[in-house]
Structure formats: C-alpha cells, structure tokens
Image (cartoon, rainbow, N blue to C red):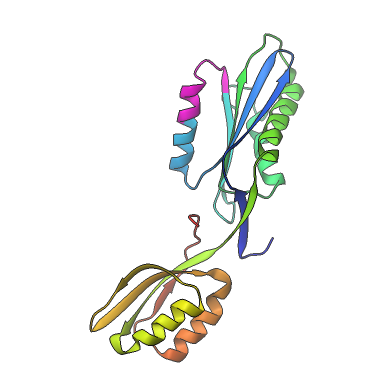
Amino acid sequence: MSLFYFQTIEKSSEGLFKEKGSKFLAFALPVRSEEEVKEQLEKLRKKYFDARHHCYAWVLGPVKTRFRANDDGEPNHSAGDPILGQIRSRDLTDVLVVVVRYFGGTKLGVSGLIQAYRTAADEALSNAEIIRKELTVEGRFNYPYASTTEVQRLIKDFDLVILQQEFGESCSLNFQLKQSSMDLFLEKVNLLQFTGTTLTLDLDDKK
C-alpha cells in the first residue's frame, strides 16, 4: 500500500456464524475516533442487551498505531484477538468489528471460540465494501492581498480544499492538501515568496 493512501470500509456490514446452538452476529462499522467507537458499542449493547457477550476489536488512524481487542468475558485472547486479526489481514483502519454472541448451551472450548469469532468477523468484513482514501495534510499561510490571484491559482492547480479563508490588507488561507502533492506545493509557495507561510502535517481521517 502506498504511503499516501490507507484502506477502510465504505459503510456498515454484517455477518452471521452459527455453531452448536450459539449464534455469532458480526458487525463491521467505519469509525473515525475512540469516541465514535464507544458510541457504536453502546448502540449495539442496547439493541442486543440480552446477548451474553459483545466482543470487539478496532483499529484507528492511517498508520494503524491505535488499536484494541476486547474479549468481553470470553477466555483471554479467544475473541478480540481473532477479530483484530481479520481487520489486520485486510490491511484496514478506521474500522470497528463487534461480534455479539448468543450462547446456545454447548461450550465450544477456546479453539472453537477462536474459530467462531474469526469466522464471524470474516463474514462481516467480506460483506463490506473496501475503499482507499488518500492522506491529506492541513496547512495555513498568510499572504498580501496583492497576491490573491496567485493564491487562487494555487487552489485550482493543487485542488486545495478550503477550510477557512480571510480577506483584508493581510489575507490568510486554511486548507487541506493531498499529501502526495505536498513537496511540489511547498516548492511553488516558496517561489511565490508568501510571507509568514506555515504548514503543519495532520493526517486526515475525515475525507
């Protein structure tokens, strides 16, 4: 995968696995923050309040450094880790997968649970549409009003997304830029000699 892109899912999807009377309902959901993870978990817990377990795993951020797996009362590493493994095997991020278990009366054993949670998660992710998103950076620069024409050309040439723009004797522009275009963009800005130019990297999960 290119350093300028990451993979996630377009929208929610579901899966189902049954084993010895137990039902494993799986849900794959696109998320962008830990707060959103908590909100989605709470919704599923309320909807399936009578289920014995709500096991899950999530991965956040383009570089995938934020993640968690939770067994929710199942034997250690028998549920959350298999779910997380399915997310990672597809090189996905900004994804939450929850598997809700209704106990059927027959114990499956640790190996059986691992297989069941892995299969349920696989079903949900197999039904999801995987998409590729391009990383962006956020930037801001200040420029004199006389340079407005050149700034408008930059916006058009680099397909900048305008976050905020202020006009006056001294103007400013807050924008999003494709990370793959950043080096060329900086070269162009330096050539135009804008005053007070500052750029800060901010990997964007919103696009």
Give the image location of residue 55, x and y in percent.
59, 28
Residue drawn 49% across and 59% down? 204
Residue 151 visible in the snapshot: yes
At horizontal 67% and vertical 11% (from top left) the residue drawn is 104
- The residue lying toward the viewer, choosing from 189 and 151, is 151
Quadrant of image for the N terminus: bottom right
Q: Which residues are magenta?
A: 42-53
Q: Is residue 187 above or below residue 16?
A: below
Residue 120: where, in percent of width, then height? 69, 30
Depth check, front residue: 119 or 65: 119
Quarter of the rendering containing residue 57: top right
Above or below 152: residue 122: above
Q: Residue furthest top?
A: 105
Left or right of residue 189, residue 13 in this image: right
User: Which percent across, then down, holds residue 155?
Assistant: 44, 77
Left or right: residue 24 versus residue 161 is right
- Residue 46 falls inside the magenta stretch: yes
